[in-house]
Amino acid sequence: MPHLAIERWAKIAASAPDNPIVLTVEGTHGLIIHAVTKAAAERGARAGARLTDARALDPTLIAEPADPADDAALVERLSKWSGRWSPLVEVDGDGLRLDVTGVAHLFGGERGLVRDVQRSFARVGLTTRVAVAPTAAAAWALAHHAPCICGGDMAAKLAPLHVSALRLDPDTVRTLERLGLKTIGSLIDVPRLALARRFRGAEDVVDALDRAFGRKPEPLTAAPTEPLPRAMFRQEEPATHPEAASQALERLIPDLVCQLQQRHLGARRLALHGFRVDGSVATASVATAIPSREPKHLQRLLADKAAALDPEFGFDAFALVAEWTEGQNAAQESLVEEPSGERDVARLVDRLTVKLGPRAVRQPQPEQSHLPERASGWIPALAKREAIELPPVRRPQRLLDRPEAIDVIYATPEGMPRRFVWRRAVHDIARAEGPERIAPEWWRSPSSARLRDYYRVEDATGRRYWIYREGLIGDGRGGLPNWFIHGLFG
Amino acid sequence: MAAGLSLVGGGGNRTSEIRELPSGLGGRWHSPVPPSPTLSELFAAHPRDGGWAGFLLPQLGTGKPLLWVQDRMAILESGRIYPPGWPGQDLIHVEARDARDALWAMEEGVRCAALSAVIGEIWGDPRALDFTATRRLAVASERSGTTCWLVRLSGNANLSGARMRWRIASAPSLLNDLNPRASGAPVWDAELFRAREIPPGRWSVAHDASAFHLVAASGDRALGENRRLSA
């Protein structure tokens, strides 16, 4: 993408195309031109030159600050978007590298693929230079210097290119130029041994040549060891109706389930990507509690989220990816078709979690603590629980999330409570039991934390509550003790 | 679910009555159980009365997970369910935003036969909780065989599809043999005010380690019937 920065800027600023605009970055000796519009280029400005030099040629140049970080973010976004052509995409400077091995025939050959890529990027307003070559280094060289599609004739295509196309560092390039080796073709003719002897280490010319001609592997680093199970569906026409994603889902799920079956995997997390025509990607993802590859269940989980995907200007492709999978052996439910309980519960939890959110569906996890609110934590339902035994003490069936302050009348400050007022209702305490003293956890709480004396009280009507007095008189951690209600007994 | 409850004697001076029975417990009481799992509605006599939870606890099966749904108001007003108070129960807790979500979660749960029971707490009389919603729960529960308890906090007993409707209030507890100033075994005043094929009634019941026992004769007609039944 040779004009990415300026095209992005032009899109944001919506300026007239014939304004002589240059984007600048801070250099060591003042502003340096980063990108130029066509109009500015005609007036002598070029990328890499100093702004003052360019202004000397034409003082009407308009300088704007460039934003390389946002440019890089755009490239990053585009790399995701390019997942529509190939699952292996890598960001390479201001360009993208796609591993199209075995992919091109889906788009009517390499020529069709290149056309599709160029058209898609042009729709987004970006100029591209596309080259297809057997090796990544050769593709880079061709894309930057002579965009074309080459197969067996790679050597011939590369030969006339300048040596800088090998991505050598500038010093090496200068040395080669001085030696009269200006093109790749002339470099090939030099005996390897002589080259290897002259250029070593970082400026390894032989190495660069080998990479370009495929004598040395240069895999895309983005390549995961094993590709994720992925189903793809592209639309003939961009679909703008809201049901597009749901309809695509119906086609994608059987495909994905088939792949999962072949690899004995079950999905734990699924993502449905909708590729929009304007170069953005909408994603809906769901997670399951146990590995699953049951089409009905996955469909049910994703259906709502898929329907909520906003097509904006239209989706033209969808991909369903199992981002996280776990081994799952082929299993028959049972001979009499009685689904197992555990799996049923897991499916229920999935459905609840998808709709209500993971924080809403939880299971208890006991903790090593005597503080009642800390003794019982909550973790996502069906997550692995640690086996922690709690001492068998009598605890209320319900606990208020925050203890509520109550007014208490007592016989003596340290004695049993007699009557309390909670939420403006007076409760006469008929019976009380306590105190159960729970000391603050000094290793966790501030030193001003006070101990709690818990009482189990029963009011005149028989309702049973768990109340506590925080602190003691004269414990040096505050004034009179406060009373709180913490729980309700059943 | 045929857990026993026992009846504390009725009328007059309750305390003297209890003293007559050393353990404070009367005859065994069997909670009227519908012939098959279904939806029961349970009204807490007062939103800040947690007694119904104690009444429910002995009636829950164990071994299978229990789905407990609370809407946000129920949590705010009368507290979140506290697992250490429910030993032996494999809980899955759902915190629903509102009654609609809570009812949805309950219905999803009720359809799952692998749960021991579904308990849903709804605060007030939300619009989402109408006859259709309760009827759906009842039908789903009967179809899957998963018991469903709809707990109504601070709600009115409007039209409902529930097969059994209870009103539960706490009553003064039994005498504590070890410490007379402490509360003893909890007693509940349980009123079955609507049920299909089962005569309604009102009982005062307590639960010891294994069974419900009648505690006090509240002196209404239903008690007589119950005595006849148990005789």
Image (cartoon, grey):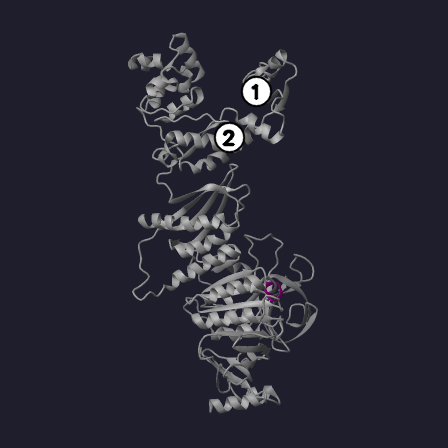
Callout 2: few (<14), some (14-19), or many (20+) C-alpha neighbours within 10 Å?
few
The residue depicted at 40 percent of the width and 50 percent of the height is: A253
Which one is earlier in the sequence, the residue at label 2 or at label 1? 1
- Res A369 seen here: no
Residue A122: give its label: 2
The amino acid beneath tag 1 is Lys
Callout 1: few (<14), some (14-19), or many (20+) C-alpha neighbours within 10 Å?
some
Q: Quarter-wise, where is residue B12 in the image?
A: bottom right
Q: Quarter-wise, where is residue A181 in the image?
A: top left
Magenta residues?
B74-78
Assign a secondary structure to mark 2. Answer: helix
Q: x and y percent of residue B75 in the render? A: 59, 63
For mark 1, what is the residue? A38
How much space separates mark 2 and mark 1, taking CA atoms? 17 Å
Is residue A287 found left or right of A135 in the rendered image?
right
Which chain is home to disc 1?
Answer: A
